[in-house]
Amino acid sequence: MKRLNLLLASVFMFCVCTKEEIRADNGQNMMAGITPENYPRVDGSTSTQPVNALIACKLLGIPYSWQPGILEWGIRPDWDRIPSSEQQQWINFFRERILVSQTHGAFMNLIDGNADIILTHRTISPDEKAHAEEVGVTLVETSVAMDGFVFVVNSNNPVKSLTVDQVRDIYTGRITNWSRVGGNDEIIKPYVRPRNSGSEEIMRSLVMQGQETADLPEIRQISSMAGVFPEIKNEPNSMCYTFKYFKEMQVRVSDEDVPPIAINGIFPDEASVRNRTYPFIAEVHVAIRSDLDRNSMAYKMYEWLRTEAGRQVIAESGYIPLETSGNGMEVTDVTDIRIYPNPVTEGFYVTGLIHPAQLTLLDVSGRLMYSGQAVNNEYIHIKSLPEGMYIAVLSTAKGSRQIKIIKK
């Protein structure tokens, strides 16, 4: 290992590269005490593979590059720059410690104790919450990056923009012909993703907001996120959703081949995502179990991801890191925040939010019991938390509001 570190330092310390070229960490992003032996079991969605791999390469000094795979690009070790005598140990390391179980699989692994920390494009789903409550597990979830949730159409489709309501009306079956939204006189053929997939749950929470997708023969399911793009290219009247990052960085499909459309007249480019003027902003979350040992490397990684060093690695991966306040939590806009019901039994709603806010629950001793995104009028499940008094802290652009809640 010492020989590997010396080799990497001498070869890569002064290298200036493009995203396709070889990189290695220069030491400034190291997390104290981390080694291949104590590295946590990291899991995640397909769309977070690059950042999970990049974090490992940065923290352990492994040379890496963007490389094409069977279906999509990813960040992987550059084996040509690693001595052959040490390659197998790194192959074993990535096989055992850097998992890509997809969103639902990653959450289940975290809940069941088969992963220590996960990065995904969404928070825990209702099905996963139910499983966590059955086994007595509570998760802590924190936003660390943002991305655009985009809708793509066939390149020959004349429709270049839809309103938020039109998108919902298409998926609820109230609009079934492209002519209703300025397009050709053709039946719309929307695609969906499987339940509990990252993009499908984001579609339901962020876009549909409680409205159900219609059960129509024209609405068909695509099993994989990479499979969205050939389907859209081959079906002139189709429409589906994906993540901006996945499209641009992983499958690398050009806008000419599969164009994203504007929403409310706002095109999903980097500027509109960064300043949140684009209506559909998806966030990347890091999640851990609330009972995780605070001295473990998994918990230290959870904290490190919200430091400036962690934000730099997130930015290098191609994601947009969240701007944070002094305590590391996201800042967003807010009006008059309320929590109801209070006292609570199994959960509560947060009202008065214009944009999602960061919610943290602390017990009376100040111990972190829950952290995640709060969306206006979305139910927050806390059934698995013990009875007692908690302080709910909601962080927004206009400061933080603390609300005392009683759990019965």
Image (cartoon, rainbow, N blue to C red):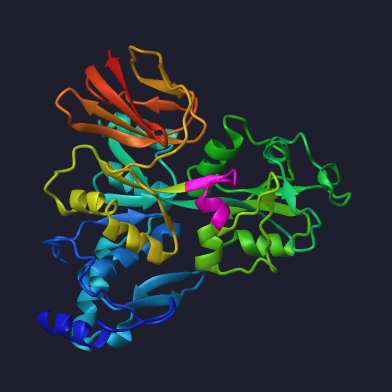
- Left/right placement of residue 18 relative to residue 177 reads left
Most foreground residue, 258 or 362? 362
Image: magenta residue range: 271-282
As drawn, 183 above or below 90: above
98 vs 218, nearest the viewer:
98
Residue shown at 19% from the left, 51% from the top: 300
The percent position of residue 284, horizontal first and vertical second, equals 41, 50
Q: 129 or 349, which lies in front?
A: 349
Vertical side of 396 occupied by 283: above or below = below
Q: Which residue, as the protein is rendered here, is positioned at the far front? A: 398
Q: Residue furthest right?
A: 185
Question: Residue at 14% across / 66% down in the picture?
Answer: 35
Q: In the displayed structure, does residue 360 sit left or right of residue 374?
A: left
Residue 116 visible: no
> With respect to residue 283, does 166 lie above or below?
above
Residue drawn at (28%, 70%) of the image: 57
Image x and y of residue 373, in percent:
40, 37
Q: Quadrant of residue 372?
A: top left
Residue 356 belongs to the span the image colors magenta: no
Point out residue 114 in the picture as x, y percentages from the top left corner: 25, 50
User: Does residue 280 belong to the magenta stretch?
Assistant: yes
Quarter that holds the C terminus: top left
Q: Describe residue 229's horizontal placement relative to residue 78 as left or right.
A: right
Total tally of numbered discs in the picture: 0
Q: Residue at x 63, y 69 (%)?
A: 254
Viewport quadrant of the N terminus = bottom left
Can you see residue 44? yes
The picture quadrant where one finds residue 385 is top left
Whether 169 is drawn above or below 75: the answer is above
